[in-house]
Image: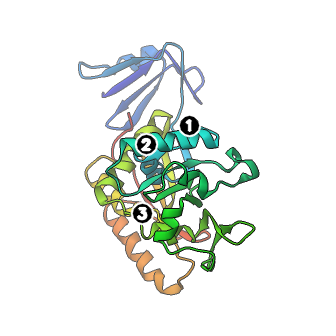
Amino acid sequence: MDLVLRSGNVYGVRGATACAVDQGVIVAVGSDDEVSSLVTARTEVVDLAGRPLLPGFQDAHAHPVFAGLNLLRCDLTEPHDEAGYLRELAAYAAAHGNRPWVMGAGWSYDAFGGGQPHRAALDGVIADRPVYLAVQDAHSAWCNSRALALAGIDRHTPDPEGGRIERDADGEPTGVLHESAMELVSSVAPRPDAAEIRRALLLAQSRLHALGVTAWQDAILGDYGGWPDAFDAYRSADADGLLTARVRGALWWEPSRGLEQLAELRERRAMARASGARTSGRRPSRSCRTGWPRTSPPR
């Protein structure tokens, strides 16, 4: 037996205080006396001291790789006002002076008067390097003037299909880009390589496990809004036994393309199946689903 948890309160099983796990499978639930008989010299025994033992939480809509990349870049999730964001940004830029772009995420609209940030605030902190900061929900970005210039965005730039460039009363871009407009800047920014994407996935997985989340649906697997496609990162982590969560993935349906992408989606689903993943033929909204089983228990 690999693991025995005892002296707790097992959720959903009346009177049960202990649980035994072997090779990632729950093999026994019962009283301390009943389960203790399974303990051997190799068993790790955890005293729950009366605390509850719950099943792992499952997140139905998550972007772990996006979140992991945020943690590896300029993380703006802790402050909650413009001044705090700018302090974090200045500190990060000073500590990473060798990076040609300053990238990050985590800001929120309600931290700004009027609900919208402006490029001028970023210019006052960093003017010589482009800045690209995704909002918390990953559907918008806040950029400085340098980033807009590199992307060729000015008052004459039309809104792309499926996106919007925020403009002030004079028609000048404010630095906030929504949905597909984000790609106007992200397409000229440095792209994370495979190693960084995988590192982001594993960092996010460790954070989620620490919160009791053992399974999730990654709501976008594909290139979206400048975010990288995490499909290969999941496959490589799974192949190396590092994917300890149970994952269902939604393959991104490109709204600007048509039915010709069905063959590509079928091929990706087949690749996932080849690695032992469970898949589904459903295509809700703009995605279809594929999934990886958990290869080892989260600890």
Q: Quadrant of residue 193?
A: bottom left
Label 1 with label 3: CB-CB less than 8 Å:
no
Q: Residues within 10 Å of mark 2 (few under 14, many from 20)?
A: some
Q: Quadrant of the N terminus?
A: top left
Of callouts 1 and 3, which one flags the residue occurring earlier in the amino acid sequence?
Answer: 1
Tell me the residue that label 3 is attached to. Answer: 228
Q: Looking at the image, which is closer to me, 65 or 142?
A: 142
Mark 1–mark 3 Cα distance, whole angstroms, equals: 24 Å
Viewer-nearest of discs 1 and 2: 2
Label 2 with label 3: CB-CB less than 8 Å:
no
Q: Amino acid at mark 2?
A: Tyr
Q: Looking at the image, which is closer to me, 110 or 243?
A: 110
Please indicate, yes or no, whether residue 280 appears anywhere in the rendered image. Answer: no
Tell me the residue that label 1 is attached to. Answer: 78
User: Residue 115: where, in percent of width, then height?
Assistant: 72, 52
Question: What residue appears at the point 50 percent right and 53 percent down from the top-left corner?
Answer: 63
Tell me the residue that label 2 is attached to. Answer: 92
Dot 3: element: loop
Of callouts 1 and 2, which one flags the residue occurring earlier in the amino acid sequence?
Answer: 1
Q: Amino acid at mark 1?
A: Glu
Q: Looking at the image, which is closer to me, 28 or 120?
A: 120
Q: Quadrant of residue 24?
A: top left
> In the drawing, does residue 284 fall left or right of residue 274?
right
